Image (cartoon, helix red, strand yellow):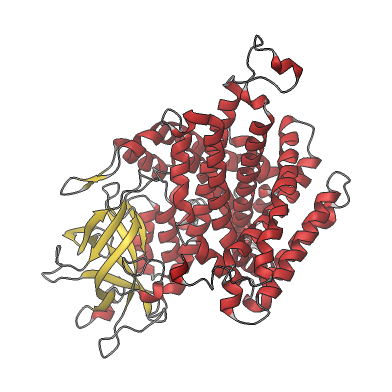
Amino acid sequence: MSLRPTVDFLLYDWLNVPSLSERERFADHSRETFDAVLDTCERIAREKYAPFNRLVDMQEPHFDGEKVVLPQATHDAQKAYAASGMLSAAQDYEVGGMQLPYTVEASANAFFAMASVSIGSGMLTTGNANLLMVHGTDAQKRVFALNEFSGRFSGTMCLSEPQAGSSLSDVATRAVPDGEGFENDPLGPRYRLRGNKMWISAGEHELTDNIIHLVLAKIPDENGKLVPGTRGISLFIVPKKMVDTEGQLTGERNDVALAGLNHKCGWRGTTNTLLNFGEGKYPVNGEAGAVGYLVGVAGKGLHCMFHMMNEARIGVGLAATMLGMAGYHASLDYAKNRPQGRPMGPAGKDPAQPPVRIIEHADVKRMLLAQKSYCEGALALELYCARLVDEQHTADAATADDARLLLEVLTPIAKSWPSEWCLEANSLAIQIHGGYGYTRDFPVEQYWRDNRLNMIHEGTHGIQGMDLLGRKVLMENGKGLQLLAGRINATIERAVQLPELAAHANALGQALAQVGSATKAAWATGNPTDALANAVPYMQAFGHTVLAWIWLDVALAAHAAAESAARTGRLAAMRFFFHYELPKIGAWLQVVSSRDQTCAALPEEAF
């Protein structure tokens, strides 16, 4: 079963991506060029990624005393990905990019995530370089970003610390000026960093000539003290190996040392590291301290880093989606070919009759349809968000600003919803396989293990929920939420005209009203403690409402298409979501609206 028909439908029949070619930035492109990119990426994913997904899971990265060793397949896949040009796909021609719409770039990357998310493609490297293209100096762009886009260097993001986790206020890594004249270094104000970072994906390897770490650290005040909270956080470029002003390696290591590898339940093909900065293992110019170059303005590092974090959150959502999709395709194939049991009714009582394939059982169909509704709906959501990125960058000012606000509201959903519900799809894929599902004879147990990380990657569910209810729906006087409601109501108005979709349109209208009421009720006391006690149930209900809207909008496009099995399947997935999933929001929103304190008020000793 191929992913391509679904991608083509969403890009061309639903989102009308070829219309972007009318804009100056994309004028050289057409459906033909978009198809050529998708063809290339689908082929590389099929040849260089998919055959080695189990291999990289079994042969985890290991440290041989000098370097981190990865399977040759990972090296080959990374080189093929870099050679495809996808690292700089959306960048200007002038810097070697293709000026592709981000919607097409995201669609192309879906093939790699589905083939082997564990091998990885270029999400962190591209995000790192994209950040520098916005916030870096000309020299930083030339030396670091352009070498990342070419695949010569790779990139990371270094936020978390062992003692702080997701609490960036408690970052303790220090950055002090590197002697007299530190501000005049051609690569940016030069500092020495000392501290420890944890959970750094791709933090150490030999896949590229250099690794460019983007590191959050605090510059001490005149008394040598760190500024409390996030206000004092700055962002630094810390290369693994020192470079000159032309990006050539000087032959000297920077003072960044591998402290250990984390051994994970999934994504085992990607190294995950603890890094020590400035411990003196690799002194630079005879002095301990990792050399780092300030990005942007001191004390504004978190603002810069959110450029990469938001991009990564959409990337994590897409990865979760495609792992769910991989499990769906595997369990669908299994269900079509596995004979077991007999049909209900008189015919099934004759043991002499041959067993039927399990796809003929109603409950297996239920599990398959659930997976289809979760995964294809999530893919539509991710591509809708990608289309908003294109609007933000290339549309007129008013449309671009609307896209910015919509992205602010939808980003927590784009990250969290697939990471929860496409994980559930993976669980259902295991269930369909029965006992075989939890053995390594079939790939579905690996897909589940890989996907379990995504509810934690780039901000846990709790963080995303607080971001949504505590910030995003309130920002700019709720304008983003109002814009989203406007988009949903526009879909409802179109769908209510069609007899086949009218009941679903009305159900979505009622769900939207429930979310609006719950949002007001949560904040009725004005007390964040009351409002945010049930931020995750709020986000779950909000996400289900958004997905119901996405499915209804997709159904409008499917309804207009010619009769086919694909059309029947899409409309059935939409009906499943409205009948089986959307009604769940009532329970979630009940505790939000009542500001239920069952969890928040329970004393520790009662557990």
Q: Residue furthest top?
A: 352
Q: Quadrant of residue 229?
A: bottom left
Q: Where's residue 526, x and y in %?
A: 63, 82
Relative vertical location of residue 238 with respect to residue 185 in this rendering, above or below: above
Q: Residue furthest left?
A: 286
In which quadrant will I find the N terminus?
A: top right
Residue, x 86% and y 52% (percent of image)?
A: 496
In the drawing, does residue 409 fall left or right of residue 145?
Answer: right
Q: Where's residue 495, x and y in %?
A: 83, 51
Please indicate, yes or no, whether residue 313 appears anywhere in the rendered image. Answer: yes
Please indicate, yes or no, whether residue 101 appears anywhere in the rendered image. Answer: no
Residue, x 58% and y 69% (percent of image)?
A: 598
Q: Quadrant of residue 471?
A: bottom right
Q: Residue furthest bottom?
A: 223
Q: Quadrant of residue 346?
A: top right
Q: Where's residue 13, x and y in %?
A: 71, 43
In the drawing, does residue 367 fall left or right of residue 509?
Answer: left
Relative vertical location of residue 61 with respect to residue 3 in this rendering, above or below: below
Residue, x 65% and y 77% (percent of image)?
A: 523
Q: Where's residue 257, x and y in %?
A: 21, 60
Relative vertical location of residue 488 with respect to residue 111 in this rendering, above or below: below
Residue, x 49% and y 33% (percent of image)?
A: 43
